[in-house]
Amino acid sequence: MTRLTLYALISSIEEDLRRLADKYLPNQQKPRQILGEHLFLKLIERVDGDASESELTPTLEDLLAFSDLGDVYQLMRSYLSDFPSDLVDQLDNFSDDFVDLIKIRNRVMHARPLEFDDLSRTNDLCEKLKSKSSYWVSLNEIIGRLSNEPELVLRLSIPFENDAIGPSNNLPMPDFDETGFIGRRVIVDNVIRAVLGVYPVVTLVGEGGLGKTSLALKVAYEILEKKPDEYDALIFVSAKTSQLTDSEIIRIRGSVNSSIGLFEVAAGALGGNAGNPLEDLISVLSQFRVLLIIDNLETVIDKNMNELLSRIPQGSKILITTRIRLGAYEFPVQLDPMSDAEAIQLLRVTAKIRSCSRLVQASNKVIGGFCTRMRNNPLHIKWFVSAVQAGKRPEEVLADEKLFLQFCLSNVFSQVGENSRRLVRTLLALGGSYTVAELAFLTELDQSTLLSAIQELTRTNMFFATSAPTGASYETKYELSQLARAYLARFYPVSKEEQKQMLTVKRRLVSAGEQIASEAQTNPLSASSIHCRTRSDWVIAKYLRESLSKIRIDKCDEALEIIETAKGLAPDFSEVYRVEAWAYARSGNLSQAYDCYEKALEWAPDSAIVYYLFGGFLLRDMHDTEKANEMFERAMQLCPERPEPMIDYARCCLFRRNFVDAMSAIEKLEVGAIRNEHIDMKIADIHLQYFTRYAESCFVNHEYYKCLEALEGSREFYDSISHPDRRMRDRLAKLLYIVAQLKLALGNDVDGCQRVDSFSSWIQGLLFKDSGQPPLASSSDSQYDLALVNHGAICRLHGSGQFGFIRQDDGDEIYFRLSQVSDERLLTSFAVGVRVKFDTKFDWKGRLVAVNVKSEG
């Protein structure tokens, strides 16, 4: 109807222009002089097909009869002075409109797709012209007849004009010919670039009814118009087997229903020979540059089609429309529903063309509501207008989508596997969007099976993904499309019992997640706390908590297997690498642990817990106090309210003998806001360590009186602690070696020696409480060695076989050389974890080291 109406109006304007040209052009000149050489020869050729041999002497009127709108309009512009002034005013004032009309005329006569506003723009020009009725006689006549006889256009036949040049084609008239092509300019340009680019196969992928075929034809016609030299031929073949009407789905007679049948049609359109259809088509594609457009591929996907796509000759391309992605060979272009504005425009234009007054008179708000309920799907909108035009109420049509849903999705859902159906039913029952990790928990499918199902569903366009930033990465969630949800709810509803079971599983996940979040908020820097970015990390946290339990009982290999599963589900989750680092550190693989901490920071560069625990690892396992110091400082910046980073920062300062900064941190800790019994004991312990380590440092540096003051300071502080623990007394016991050496160093200083004896007696009194042994008589007694026995477990041996480290019962580690080990059983890698006893002394570097290392057994 639209194209025929345009043909009627534009033909009448052409007729009026020819008549006006014949009337006013100077008739004293010969036609050749009036028309000019180029136009004269072109019209002569149209008259008899051979201007060079023509012996005819046609009149101007004869030649003008073969001119088109563009020819006669440009001719009149060349002789404006010969035409009445009011006609010239029209030609001048409406020059842009005439230029546009020429383009519209060419689209009508050359079977090119119409633009959505072609009819409205033509009508606007006609309204402007008909005011001068004496000039536009034919135009006024046809407008009157169309008004009185709307069916007149149905009796018209358009004499389509063949292109003189350009590639051959069999492109059909697109189904948007009625309304013109609306919107989607960006995606049209993108597809054209892809088809003209390096990709041998371009697929337009989308759910049913989105206009994939229309878009493919729009692209093909634009290439035909703007890039005629790119291809020798543009061939369209369709595997569409059914058609949607306003009341039923009808089977298309003679439709192609196999890949072989499709190859035969395509090869036949290119002049191929009968025989092997696949080889015949490939042969033709290799001889000519062909753009082969395959419509509705999802109905004929098989091994033959895959072979064709893998063997496309260079120079030829295939453009495919499909509801199911191929997964290989293709450059996919996803087609989404129309925008709100485009959908409203399509409904209005369709309703106006079909004279559906009920919809034409509706407000934009009402029309927009209809489009939203139809998910802005073009086919759904056209089907809706047809049904309303047939007499149904809009609400009635929207309430019953059965036919539309069945047409769009029945041949898609039937092709997915059992695991994909299980995943679809889970999403249908629970609603919303979920990550891979959540879906693994909810469906109880293993990771590999789940990812295969997701890939299959994504190819069908029943399933789509959305991504949102989460820290240094992106979180991808999957959900059913609106159309798929509507289809499944109608034809494959979830039973009440099935939904109840799935909701129970989801509630378990939510409950576990809330507990995990609560623990992380209560103890944000605990190694056992898991900091989830979003809800989806709850599933990963369950795996990580299980692995933490394994690590605590030294089943690190099992823990690492669990962590690998978690990593597969969330490879960008910092906490996975942080827990993995602990597992490697516990198993003695320090280089792997270091790398894991680095990866954790890459994914979460502002994670206080990663900086804090990485610092602890560097301090205790790697003895890298400088880098550990940096980590603790960063943790304090990120989590200033928590005391734990500052406690370990103070400890790191003590290791580095930076006693000023250590005491500054301790003083801040002692007035901190977050205090409990556990924190108070840790602060008291680090304060006591300050005195013991400062005393050791002073003694090594021969600052004996400062050493004595530090010893007495440790006593004073210890006595101020309400409930000191055994570890604190063990720290003081280590000072007995210093006490013995200090008294010797003080020599004849009676007062100093008495102060040393007093401190010594006090320590021995503390030890007596634990051991039940009486204290020694004086600090000069050689029996001091009895108090110097320490206990711990070998935590690691260096690869050089020269030294190792013992983790003492108070948590500190101490260096020892293997030459100080008398038991050969302690010289192998199997010795890690074995309990030992040892003495201590200061080595030549001033370090306190273990000597006389023996097995406790």
Image (spheres, rainbow, N blue to C red):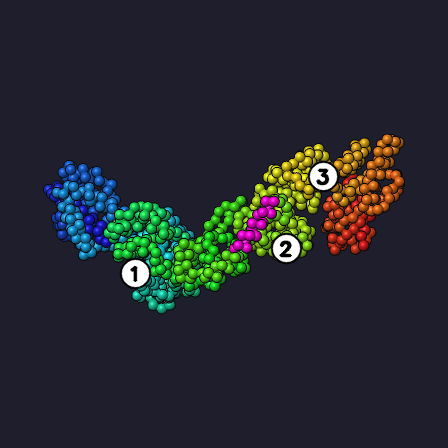
Instruction: Give the mark, 2 or 3, whose residue is nearer the N terminus.
Output: 2
Dot 3 lies on which element?
Answer: helix
**Which span of residues is magenta-colored?**
506-522
Under mark 3, the amino acid is Ala
For residue 627, what is the image quadrant? top right
224 displayed left or right of 413: left
Q: In terms of secondary structure, where does tag 2 sit?
A: helix
Q: Residue at x 82, y 40 (%)?
A: 763
Q: Is residue 188 magenta?
A: no
Magenta span: predominant SS is helix
Q: Nearer the viewer, mark 3 or mark 1?
A: 3
The kind of secondary structure element at disc 1 is: loop
**In front here: 204 or 649?**
649
Q: Nearer the viewer, mark 2 or mark 3?
A: 3
Compared with 418, 130 (above or below) is above
Which residue has dot 3 on it? 684
Label 1 CA crowd tier, 10 Å (few <14, some 14–19, many 20+):
few
Considering every residue shown, the one lying at the far left of the view is 28
Residue type for callout 2: Ala
Is residue 534 toward the left or the right of residue 396 in the image?
A: right
Mark 1 vs mark 2, CA separation in Å: 61 Å
Q: Which residue is mark 2?
A: 559
Earlier sequence position, callout 3 versus callout 1: 1
Residue 521 part of the magenta-drawn span? yes
User: Which amino acid type is marked by label 1?
Assistant: Ser
Mark 2 nearby-residue class (10 Å; few <14, some 14–19, many ≥20): many
Q: Quadrant of the C terminus?
A: bottom right
